[in-house]
Amino acid sequence: MTQHNGTWLNQKKNLIMRNVFRDFCKSRILFNNIKGKVKDKQISFSHMEKLVGTGINKGLLWHLKDICHTLWQDCNPQDHPEEFMLDWIIGAIFHEAMKLKEDIYLLMHYKPAFEKAALSEQALKIYERCRELFETAESNINHSCHKLSCLFEKAGNQIEQVLTKEKHNPLLIRFLIQQNDLIDKAWDEPGYSQTLLKKIFPEGVERAYCIAGEGFLEGSWYAEARAAFEKALELNPNCIEATHGLRLLEKRINEVTHILKREYDAALAKNVGNSKNKSHLDDSKPDIQEIVEGNSEVIIN
């Protein structure tokens, strides 16, 4: 890996780690959907294309495999066993999914054509010789689905360990507390997202909301920051970190309000001699309030 790429990875690591977890959740949900269709004899090749894709148009798993290799293929397994193992399992999932895609393609595209051609006596003999290929593909599909289920389970367990090492990543923690439904669906377990937070933060889940609040505050997402800090205090009324975060938030809001008011007054003074322009100036209070308090509903579970 070049020094340039290494620097870029270090700068973007928090975002990349968030995306690894997000794409794992989406890939697992899509695979579970495919597995259900296979069980109901409703195989869909389009879903496999979305999951795996091609070299030209990569699917969810292909992107996930590539980014995991970029992050961890050169890591020392002795120093980073959790990351090394996760990278290996994701690679195994991808290659098994490729096999599944090929078998599904064989059944969906070639078997109907052979069956149609077998209406003639000569083609029927050829079809009989190929029948074993289709029967093997059907058996392989069931085997691959079972194997992929086991691999996704192992990857899920492994990613929990990696998340614990990344517990100070504000983008990742924000995803964990905001995407409850996606995470629960990926693990097919209602309430799993909260269980995961407790595993990552055995010292208290309020710590997760404080980290998220600090991240929101740094990005000037004031309404989201307030909701996160208040959730932390709801979980632990004695949380000093959350109390400090709210105080810092109020200070930041006052600073922003002062700047906005000053800019508004300057604009008003500049246009005071022009009654026409002055009549079109909006009241500053709604604008300031919207910027400070946010203009969208904030949900912190």
Image: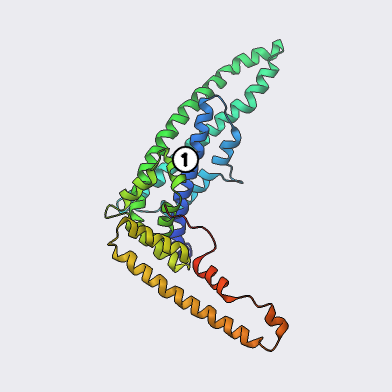
Q: Is residue 118 above or below residue 238?
A: above
> In which quarter of the view is residue 267 placed?
bottom right
| Residue reaching furthest to the top | 121
Residue 301 image offset from top left, x and y in percent: 41, 52
> In which quarter of the view is residue 284 placed?
bottom right
Which residue is at a point 40% across and 44% down the rendered structure image?
88
Residue 89 image offset from top left, x and y in percent: 40, 42
Number of marks in the image?
A: 1
Residue 1 visible to an observer of this rendering: no
Q: Which residue is mark 1?
A: 28
Nearer to the camera, 57 or 282: 282
| Amino acid type assigned to the residue bearing label 1 in the image | Arg
Quadrant where the N terminus lies? bottom left
Q: Is residue 298 above or below residue 288?
A: above
Crowd class of label 1 (few under 14; some 14 to 19; many from 20; radius 10 Å) = many
Which residue is at a point 31% across and 65% down the rendered structure image?
241
Nearer to the camera, 149 or 10: 149
Which residue is at a point 40% across and 38% down the rendered structure image?
189
Which residue is at a point 72% across and 12% down the rendered structure image?
120
Left/right placement of residue 55 relative to residue 1 reads right
Which color scheme is applied? rainbow
Residue 156 visible to an observer of this rendering: yes
Q: Is residue 135 above or below residue 61?
A: above
Residue 13 image offset from top left, x and y in percent: 43, 59
Q: Secondary structure at mark 1?
A: helix
| Residue reaching furthest to the bottom | 273
Residue 153 image offset from top left, x and y in percent: 39, 38
